[in-house]
Image (cartoon, rainbow, N blue to C red):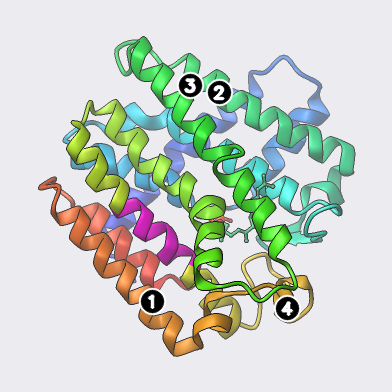
Amino acid sequence: MQTDRLGSFSKQYKTLVEERMREIVSQLEAPEILKESMLYSLEAGGKRIRPLLLFATLKAFGRAPEAGKDVAAAIEMVHTYSLIHDDLPSMDDDDLRRGKPTNHKVYGEATAILAGDALLTLSFNLLSQIPADIADANVKLTLVNMLSNAAGAEGMVGGQVSDMEGEGKNLSLEELEYIHINKTGRMLVYSVLAGAEIANADAETKTKLSKFAHHIGLAFQIRDDILDLEGTVDQIGKPVGSDTENEKSTYPSLLSLSGAKQELDRHIRAAKQALSSTGLDSILLNEITDLIGLRTS
Ligand code: GRG
């Protein structure tokens, strides 16, 4: 369920970040096979929800979304690295991602690991080179600091490790939330707060936006669990019920399907409330929130 406004905004800025990523990787002076492997996963067809959140946040502040193109590319590179590594035999051991063979199936395990490493490293390089008219040195340093926190041991990587530790255990709702706040949520929160940082938002607005993004992060994950349960194939294109994912605690397994749907609604409502409290021009962010609650892929 996407309005024309969000549809055309999303199409325009999806193209912007995709072209920017291709341009950056193509220009690297690096072995062709490494660049090919990086581009294979960058261009495998993600939803680009994180860049969309960043661009819509800039728009909410009345700033040109184009100002966020390098940060959006950096975010999508970190996200793509995490998916490449998550699919490896030593982690989820997946053959398909977004309906296509996983990076290690095409390029081999060693190159896939190195493509992920190169994407992660490149993301910080990109942030360090944002033009001064978009972000001064202090803003750039803050963007780097925030990304390293969101993606690292205290964020996404920590969440992934807790997720692995929780496999086969009956987790409490609190434990499940901790995993998803970090594994999925922190990069979504970063996408919004990076936009606020570029727009020089005040501390109070950032706190409200952080609350907004926290709720959409959890809503995103709950919707993912519901889609996994209701669909015949999951988001990586594999029949549901075919691997260890099913030994993991999920929102529906803890709360039942209808309880998970209620929890999803609760987070969507809380997100919208936090957003409205900012007083920003939040039409697009509101529509993205609805989309997260209703998404079908
Ligand atoms: C390996 C360091 C490391 C971290 C892995 C993000 C992650 C952490 C693993 C991905 C596996 C997974 C199913 C995570 C749940 C969150 C989620 C639904 C991620 C997929 O993000 P989307 O839906 O993917 O935005 P697309 O394909 O649209 O880019």
State whether residue 203 is above or below residue 230.
above
Kindly identify the amino acid type of the residue bearing the numbered disc 2.
Phe
Q: Do the CB atoms of the residues marked 2 and 3 lie less than 8 Å apart?
A: yes
Amino acid type, callout 3: Leu
Which residue is located at x 53 percent, y 51 percent? Answer: 182
Residue that numbered label 3 is attached to: 127
Please name the residue shown 26% across and 37% down the image: 58
Residue type marked 4 = Pro
Distance from disc 2 to disc 1, alpha carbons, whole Å, reads 35 Å
Mark 4 and mark 3: Cα distance apart in space? 38 Å
Residue 124's disc is 2
Measured in 3D between alpha carbons, the distance from the residue under mark 2 to the one under mark 3, in whole angstroms, is 5 Å
Q: Earlier in the sequence, mark 4 or mark 1?
A: 4
At label 1, the amino acid type is Glu
| Residue 293 x/y as whole percent | 37, 70
Q: Is residue 91 left or right of residue 228?
A: right
Distance from disc 4 to disc 1, alpha carbons, whole Å, reads 26 Å
Q: Residue 239 has which mark?
A: 4
**Badge 4: how crowded within 10 Å, few (<14), some, or many (20+)?**
few
Label placed on residue 234: none
Q: Is the residue under label 1 in contact with that under label 4 (CB below 8 Å)?
A: no
